[in-house]
Protein backbone atom coordinates (compact mmCIF):
# COMPACT_ATOMS: atom_id res chain seq x y z
CA UNK A 1 0.00 0.00 0.00
CA UNK A 2 1.37 3.38 -1.00
CA UNK A 3 2.24 5.30 2.12
CA UNK A 4 1.19 8.50 0.36
CA UNK A 5 -2.41 7.26 0.15
CA UNK A 6 -3.11 7.75 3.81
CA UNK A 7 -6.68 8.03 4.93
CA UNK A 8 -7.73 11.54 5.80
CA UNK A 9 -8.34 12.00 9.47
CA UNK A 10 -11.91 12.88 10.36
CA UNK A 11 -12.55 15.30 13.15
CA UNK A 12 -15.81 15.63 15.02
CA UNK A 13 -15.75 19.36 15.41
CA UNK A 14 -18.41 20.53 17.82
CA UNK A 15 -20.81 22.96 16.23
CA UNK A 16 -20.79 26.25 18.09
CA UNK A 17 -24.03 27.80 19.29
CA UNK A 18 -25.24 30.77 17.24
CA UNK A 19 -24.74 34.24 18.70
CA UNK A 20 -27.25 37.03 19.27
CA UNK A 21 -26.27 40.49 20.46
CA UNK A 22 -29.14 42.69 21.62
CA UNK A 23 -29.42 46.33 22.64
CA UNK A 24 -32.38 47.95 24.36
CA UNK A 25 -34.50 47.59 27.46
CA UNK A 26 -32.85 45.40 30.09
CA UNK A 27 -34.73 45.87 33.35
CA UNK A 28 -35.41 44.37 36.76
CA UNK A 29 -38.98 43.08 36.93
CA UNK A 30 -40.74 42.97 40.29
CA UNK A 31 -43.66 40.58 39.84
CA UNK A 32 -46.42 40.81 42.45
CA UNK A 33 -49.25 38.29 42.54
CA UNK A 34 -52.70 39.40 43.73
CA UNK A 35 -52.57 36.71 46.39
CA UNK A 36 -50.94 38.33 49.47
CA UNK A 37 -49.70 34.89 50.58
CA UNK A 38 -47.42 34.61 47.55
CA UNK A 39 -44.07 36.43 47.96
CA UNK A 40 -42.99 38.75 45.16
CA UNK A 41 -40.48 37.62 42.55
CA UNK A 42 -37.53 39.37 40.93
CA UNK A 43 -36.54 38.64 37.33
CA UNK A 44 -34.27 40.08 34.69
CA UNK A 45 -36.72 41.56 32.20
CA UNK A 46 -37.39 44.22 29.62
CA UNK A 47 -37.95 43.30 25.97
CA UNK A 48 -34.27 42.94 25.16
CA UNK A 49 -33.47 41.24 28.46
CA UNK A 50 -36.25 38.69 28.00
CA UNK A 51 -35.52 37.90 24.34
CA UNK A 52 -31.80 37.40 24.97
CA UNK A 53 -32.39 35.25 28.07
CA UNK A 54 -34.92 33.08 26.22
CA UNK A 55 -32.43 32.63 23.39
CA UNK A 56 -29.85 31.48 25.93
CA UNK A 57 -32.43 28.95 27.20
CA UNK A 58 -32.78 27.80 23.57
CA UNK A 59 -28.99 27.17 23.49
CA UNK A 60 -27.83 30.40 21.84
CA UNK A 61 -24.91 32.52 23.03
CA UNK A 62 -26.64 35.74 24.13
CA UNK A 63 -24.91 39.09 24.69
CA UNK A 64 -27.18 41.94 25.87
CA UNK A 65 -25.89 45.50 25.56
CA UNK A 66 -26.95 47.74 28.44
CA UNK A 67 -25.85 50.78 30.44
CA UNK A 68 -26.82 50.01 34.02
CA UNK A 69 -26.16 51.77 37.30
CA UNK A 70 -24.01 50.36 40.09
CA UNK A 71 -26.71 49.41 42.62
CA UNK A 72 -28.54 46.49 44.20
CA UNK A 73 -31.07 46.29 41.36
CA UNK A 74 -28.22 45.61 38.93
CA UNK A 75 -26.81 42.89 41.18
CA UNK A 76 -30.15 41.07 41.26
CA UNK A 77 -30.72 41.55 37.52
CA UNK A 78 -27.25 40.30 36.60
CA UNK A 79 -27.57 37.34 38.98
CA UNK A 80 -30.66 36.15 37.12
CA UNK A 81 -28.99 36.61 33.73
CA UNK A 82 -25.96 34.68 34.93
CA UNK A 83 -28.15 31.84 36.22
CA UNK A 84 -29.36 31.41 32.61
CA UNK A 85 -25.85 31.54 31.11
CA UNK A 86 -26.39 34.94 29.49
CA UNK A 87 -23.05 36.57 28.71
CA UNK A 88 -22.79 39.97 30.47
CA UNK A 89 -19.58 41.08 28.72
CA UNK A 90 -21.33 44.00 26.98
CA UNK A 91 -23.20 45.29 30.04
CA UNK A 92 -21.64 48.25 31.82
CA UNK A 93 -22.32 49.57 35.32
CA UNK A 94 -21.53 53.17 36.20
CA UNK A 95 -22.81 56.04 38.37
CA UNK A 96 -24.35 57.76 35.31
CA UNK A 97 -26.12 54.62 34.06
CA UNK A 98 -29.63 53.48 34.95
CA UNK A 99 -31.13 50.15 35.93
CA UNK A 100 -34.81 50.32 34.98
CA UNK A 101 -37.25 48.84 37.49
CA UNK A 102 -40.74 47.78 36.42
CA UNK A 103 -43.40 46.61 38.87
CA UNK A 104 -45.80 44.07 37.39
CA UNK A 105 -49.02 43.08 39.13
CA UNK A 106 -51.00 39.97 38.28
CA UNK A 107 -54.68 40.03 39.24
CA UNK A 108 -57.98 38.45 38.20
CA UNK A 109 -61.16 40.21 37.13
CA UNK A 110 -64.62 39.15 38.35
CA UNK A 111 -64.77 36.52 35.59
CA UNK A 112 -61.44 35.01 36.58
CA UNK A 113 -59.54 36.41 33.61
CA UNK A 114 -55.90 37.32 34.10
CA UNK A 115 -55.02 41.02 34.25
CA UNK A 116 -51.38 42.10 34.05
CA UNK A 117 -50.58 45.73 34.83
CA UNK A 118 -47.31 47.66 34.75
CA UNK A 119 -46.32 50.26 37.33
CA UNK A 120 -43.51 52.79 36.85
CA UNK A 121 -43.78 54.65 40.16
CA UNK A 122 -42.56 53.50 43.54
CA UNK A 123 -45.71 52.66 45.58
CA UNK A 124 -43.82 53.56 48.75
CA UNK A 125 -43.41 57.25 47.92
CA UNK A 126 -44.90 57.92 44.46
CA UNK A 127 -41.52 58.72 42.86
CA UNK A 128 -40.73 57.57 39.33
CA UNK A 129 -38.76 54.36 39.25
CA UNK A 130 -35.46 54.42 37.29
CA UNK A 131 -36.03 54.50 33.52
CA UNK A 132 -34.07 53.25 30.51
CA UNK A 133 -30.91 55.04 29.38
CA UNK A 134 -29.38 54.07 26.02
CA UNK A 135 -25.75 53.21 25.58
CA UNK A 136 -23.78 56.32 24.63
CA UNK A 137 -22.65 56.63 21.03
CA UNK A 138 -19.12 57.18 22.28
CA UNK A 139 -19.15 53.62 23.70
CA UNK A 140 -19.98 51.91 20.40
CA UNK A 141 -16.39 51.43 19.25
CA UNK A 142 -15.30 49.85 22.53
CA UNK A 143 -18.32 47.53 22.48
CA UNK A 144 -17.53 46.42 18.94
CA UNK A 145 -13.90 45.69 19.80
CA UNK A 146 -14.80 43.24 22.56
CA UNK A 147 -17.87 41.66 20.99
CA UNK A 148 -18.05 38.53 18.81
CA UNK A 149 -19.64 38.64 15.36
CA UNK A 150 -23.27 37.57 15.80
CA UNK A 151 -25.74 35.77 13.59
CA UNK A 152 -28.37 38.26 14.78
CA UNK A 153 -28.47 41.76 16.18
CA UNK A 154 -31.70 42.58 18.04
CA UNK A 155 -32.78 46.03 19.17
CA UNK A 156 -35.98 47.43 20.64
CA UNK A 157 -35.26 51.14 21.09
CA UNK A 158 -34.57 53.85 18.52
CA UNK A 159 -31.34 55.66 19.36
CA UNK A 160 -28.05 56.48 17.69
CA UNK A 161 -25.89 53.83 19.38
CA UNK A 162 -28.29 50.99 18.49
CA UNK A 163 -28.49 52.15 14.88
CA UNK A 164 -24.70 52.35 14.64
CA UNK A 165 -24.37 48.84 16.07
CA UNK A 166 -27.04 47.53 13.68
CA UNK A 167 -25.23 48.99 10.67
CA UNK A 168 -21.90 47.55 11.78
CA UNK A 169 -23.20 44.03 12.47
CA UNK A 170 -25.22 43.99 9.26
CA UNK A 171 -21.99 44.70 7.43
CA UNK A 172 -20.57 41.63 9.15
CA UNK A 173 -23.39 39.39 7.94
CA UNK A 174 -25.86 39.53 10.83
CA UNK A 175 -29.64 39.50 10.52
CA UNK A 176 -31.06 42.71 12.00
CA UNK A 177 -34.23 42.20 14.07
CA UNK A 178 -35.98 45.49 14.96
CA UNK A 179 -38.78 45.45 17.55
CA UNK A 180 -39.96 49.03 18.18
CA UNK A 181 -42.23 49.75 21.15
CA UNK A 182 -43.57 52.84 19.39
CA UNK A 183 -43.22 54.60 16.07
CA UNK A 184 -42.09 58.14 15.40
CA UNK A 185 -41.85 59.81 12.04
CA UNK A 186 -38.25 60.91 12.14
CA UNK A 187 -34.97 60.21 10.38
CA UNK A 188 -33.76 57.75 13.00
CA UNK A 189 -36.83 55.53 12.63
CA UNK A 190 -36.30 55.61 8.86
CA UNK A 191 -32.70 54.51 9.42
CA UNK A 192 -33.95 51.59 11.50
CA UNK A 193 -36.28 50.48 8.71
CA UNK A 194 -33.51 50.80 6.14
CA UNK A 195 -31.12 48.57 8.10
CA UNK A 196 -33.65 46.01 9.41
CA UNK A 197 -34.19 42.57 7.89
CA UNK A 198 -37.11 41.81 10.22
CA UNK A 199 -39.46 44.21 11.98
CA UNK A 200 -41.92 42.95 14.56
CA UNK A 201 -44.40 45.17 16.39
CA UNK A 202 -47.62 44.93 18.36
CA UNK A 203 -50.85 46.33 16.93
CA UNK A 204 -51.64 47.62 20.43
CA UNK A 205 -48.64 49.95 20.26
CA UNK A 206 -48.37 50.64 16.52
CA UNK A 207 -51.69 50.38 14.68
CA UNK A 208 -51.00 52.50 11.60
CA UNK A 209 -47.90 50.86 10.12
CA UNK A 210 -49.72 49.50 7.06
CA UNK A 211 -51.31 52.92 6.44
CA UNK A 212 -47.98 54.72 6.61
CA UNK A 213 -46.16 52.03 4.63
CA UNK A 214 -48.56 50.50 2.07
CA UNK A 215 -45.49 49.21 0.23
CA UNK A 216 -43.20 46.75 1.96
CA UNK A 217 -40.19 48.38 3.65
CA UNK A 218 -38.49 45.42 5.35
CA UNK A 219 -38.03 41.85 4.01
CA UNK A 220 -40.10 40.37 6.85
CA UNK A 221 -42.72 42.58 8.52
CA UNK A 222 -44.68 41.06 11.44
CA UNK A 223 -47.68 42.68 13.13
CA UNK A 224 -48.94 40.81 16.21
CA UNK A 225 -52.68 41.02 16.89
CA UNK A 226 -53.01 39.61 20.41
CA UNK A 227 -55.60 36.82 20.68
CA UNK A 228 -56.27 37.13 16.94
CA UNK A 229 -52.77 35.92 16.06
CA UNK A 230 -50.65 37.90 13.62
CA UNK A 231 -50.22 39.01 10.04
CA UNK A 232 -47.03 39.35 8.03
CA UNK A 233 -45.51 40.35 4.71
CA UNK A 234 -42.45 38.59 3.36
CA UNK A 235 -40.34 39.18 0.29
CA UNK A 236 -36.60 39.55 -0.03
CA UNK A 237 -37.21 41.86 -3.01
CA UNK A 238 -39.68 44.05 -1.02
CA UNK A 239 -42.44 43.25 -3.52
CA UNK A 240 -45.06 41.69 -1.25
CA UNK A 241 -48.38 43.54 -1.43
CA UNK A 242 -50.65 41.38 0.72
CA UNK A 243 -50.56 40.64 4.41
CA UNK A 244 -50.86 36.95 5.34
CA UNK A 245 -52.77 36.07 8.53
CA UNK A 246 -51.83 33.35 11.02
CA UNK A 247 -54.32 32.48 13.76
CA UNK A 248 -53.10 31.99 17.32
CA UNK A 249 -52.86 28.67 19.14
CA UNK A 250 -55.58 27.96 21.69
CA UNK A 251 -54.94 27.01 25.31
CA UNK A 252 -57.51 26.14 27.96
CA UNK A 253 -56.65 28.92 30.42
CA UNK A 254 -54.30 31.86 30.89
CA UNK A 255 -52.32 32.41 34.07
CA UNK A 256 -50.38 35.41 32.72
CA UNK A 257 -49.98 36.64 29.14
CA UNK A 258 -47.00 38.90 29.86
CA UNK A 259 -43.87 38.02 27.90
CA UNK A 260 -45.65 36.08 25.15
CA UNK A 261 -44.36 38.54 22.56
CA UNK A 262 -40.81 38.07 23.80
CA UNK A 263 -41.08 34.29 23.49
CA UNK A 264 -42.45 34.77 19.99
CA UNK A 265 -39.53 37.00 18.98
CA UNK A 266 -36.94 34.62 20.43
CA UNK A 267 -38.60 31.64 18.75
CA UNK A 268 -38.62 33.31 15.35
CA UNK A 269 -34.99 34.37 15.71
CA UNK A 270 -33.94 30.86 16.75
CA UNK A 271 -35.46 29.31 13.63
CA UNK A 272 -35.09 31.88 10.90
CA UNK A 273 -31.77 33.55 11.64
CA UNK A 274 -29.49 30.83 12.97
CA UNK A 275 -27.18 31.09 9.96
CA UNK A 276 -27.05 34.87 9.77
CA UNK A 277 -28.00 37.06 6.84
CA UNK A 278 -26.74 34.59 4.23
CA UNK A 279 -29.02 31.89 5.60
CA UNK A 280 -31.96 34.26 5.99
CA UNK A 281 -31.76 35.22 2.32
CA UNK A 282 -32.28 31.55 1.43
CA UNK A 283 -35.47 31.25 3.51
CA UNK A 284 -38.71 30.84 1.59
CA UNK A 285 -42.36 31.49 2.43
CA UNK A 286 -42.96 27.99 3.81
CA UNK A 287 -39.97 28.18 6.17
CA UNK A 288 -40.95 31.68 7.34
CA UNK A 289 -44.51 30.55 8.10
CA UNK A 290 -43.27 27.55 10.11
CA UNK A 291 -40.88 29.79 12.05
CA UNK A 292 -43.66 32.21 12.93
CA UNK A 293 -45.89 29.35 14.08
CA UNK A 294 -43.08 28.04 16.29
CA UNK A 295 -42.77 31.47 17.89
CA UNK A 296 -46.55 31.58 18.41
CA UNK A 297 -46.47 28.19 20.12
CA UNK A 298 -43.78 29.32 22.57
CA UNK A 299 -45.74 32.47 23.37
CA UNK A 300 -48.90 30.46 24.02
CA UNK A 301 -47.14 28.00 26.34
CA UNK A 302 -45.68 30.80 28.45
CA UNK A 303 -49.23 31.95 29.24
CA UNK A 304 -49.56 28.94 31.57
CA UNK A 305 -47.03 30.52 33.96
CA UNK A 306 -46.51 33.72 35.91
CA UNK A 307 -43.99 36.27 34.69
CA UNK A 308 -42.56 37.09 31.29
CA UNK A 309 -40.32 33.99 31.33
CA UNK A 310 -42.17 31.69 33.73
CA UNK A 311 -42.07 28.83 31.24
CA UNK A 312 -38.31 28.41 31.48
CA UNK A 313 -38.37 28.23 35.29
CA UNK A 314 -40.77 25.28 35.15
CA UNK A 315 -39.71 23.19 32.15
CA UNK A 316 -36.53 22.14 30.35
CA UNK A 317 -35.83 23.03 26.72
CA UNK A 318 -36.62 19.44 25.76
CA UNK A 319 -39.94 19.50 27.63
CA UNK A 320 -40.85 22.78 25.97
CA UNK A 321 -40.03 21.31 22.56
CA UNK A 322 -42.29 18.34 23.25
CA UNK A 323 -45.15 20.61 24.31
CA UNK A 324 -44.71 22.77 21.20
CA UNK A 325 -45.22 19.69 19.04
CA UNK A 326 -48.21 18.62 21.12
CA UNK A 327 -49.79 22.07 20.87
CA UNK A 328 -49.28 22.21 17.12
CA UNK A 329 -50.97 18.81 16.68
CA UNK A 330 -53.84 19.46 19.09
CA UNK A 331 -57.34 19.90 17.68
CA UNK A 332 -58.65 21.32 20.95
CA UNK A 333 -57.26 23.95 23.38
CA UNK A 334 -54.24 22.53 25.20
CA UNK A 335 -54.45 21.97 28.95
CA UNK A 336 -51.25 21.85 30.98
CA UNK A 337 -50.85 20.62 34.53
CA UNK A 338 -48.36 23.20 35.69
CA UNK A 339 -45.06 22.13 37.11
CA UNK A 340 -43.66 24.05 40.03
CA UNK A 341 -41.60 27.02 38.87
CA UNK A 342 -38.00 26.91 40.07
CA UNK A 343 -37.61 30.49 41.22
CA UNK A 344 -36.64 32.11 44.48
CA UNK A 345 -39.50 34.21 45.93
CA UNK A 346 -38.43 37.30 47.84
CA UNK A 347 -40.06 38.39 51.08
CA UNK A 348 -41.27 41.98 51.30
CA UNK A 349 -38.59 44.66 51.25
CA UNK A 350 -38.18 48.34 50.45
CA UNK A 351 -38.21 48.93 46.69
CA UNK A 352 -36.29 52.15 47.27
CA UNK A 353 -33.35 50.13 48.60
CA UNK A 354 -32.75 48.73 45.11
CA UNK A 355 -31.69 52.00 43.47
Image: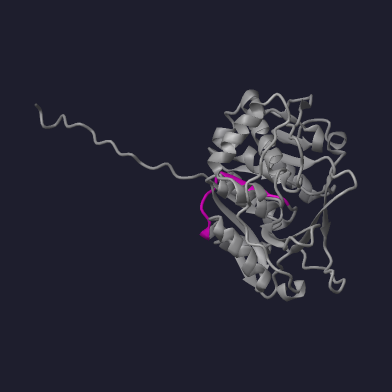
Q: Start and end of the magenta stretch?
A: 146-156
Q: Which of 207 and 193 is in front in this view?
A: 207
Q: Residue 323 at what x, y percent from top left?
A: 61, 35
Among all residues in the image, which is located at the extreme left?
1
- Give the residue drawn at x 62%, y 60%: 140
Q: Residue 113 at what x, y percent from top left?
A: 84, 44
Quadrant (top left/top right/bottom left/bottom right) for the C terminus: bottom right
| Rendered position, 231 above or below 165 | above
Toward which corner of the image does residue 206 lie, by quadrant?
top right
Residue 206 relative to residue 310: left or right: right
Q: Can residue 225 be seen in this view?
A: no
- Give the residue drawn at x 82%, y 63%: 120
Residue 147 among those drawn in magenta? yes
Q: Residue 321 at what x, y percent from top left?
A: 57, 36
Q: Can residue 58 be seen in this view?
A: yes
| Rendered position, 47 above or below 236 | below
Q: Which of 165 and 86 is in front in this view?
A: 86
Toward which corner of the image does residue 267 lie, by quadrant?
top right
Residue 143 relative to residue 231: left or right: left
What colour scheme was applied to this rendering of the protein? one colour
Residue 218 among those drawn in magenta? no
Q: Nearer the viewer, residue 11 or 219?
A: 11
- Give the residue drawn at x 60%, y 28%: 283
Report how many numbered discs are placed on residues in the image: 0
| Rendered position, 154 above or below 247 | below
Residue 288 relative to residue 33: left or right: left
Quadrant (top left/top right/bottom left/bottom right) for the N terminus: top left
Q: Residue 288 at what x, y percent from top left?
A: 64, 29
Q: Which of 97 and 27 is in front in this view?
A: 27
Amino acid sequence: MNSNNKKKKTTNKKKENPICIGAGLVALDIVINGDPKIPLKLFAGGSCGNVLTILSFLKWNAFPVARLKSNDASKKLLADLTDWNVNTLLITKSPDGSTPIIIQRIKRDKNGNSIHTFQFRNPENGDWLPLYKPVLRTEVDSLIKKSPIPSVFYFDRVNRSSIDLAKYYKGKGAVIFFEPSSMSENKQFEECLNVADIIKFSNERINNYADLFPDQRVPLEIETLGKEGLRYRFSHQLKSKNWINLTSYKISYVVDAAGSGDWFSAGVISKIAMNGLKGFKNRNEVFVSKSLKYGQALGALNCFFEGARGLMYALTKEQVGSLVRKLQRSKTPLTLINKKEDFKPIEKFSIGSLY
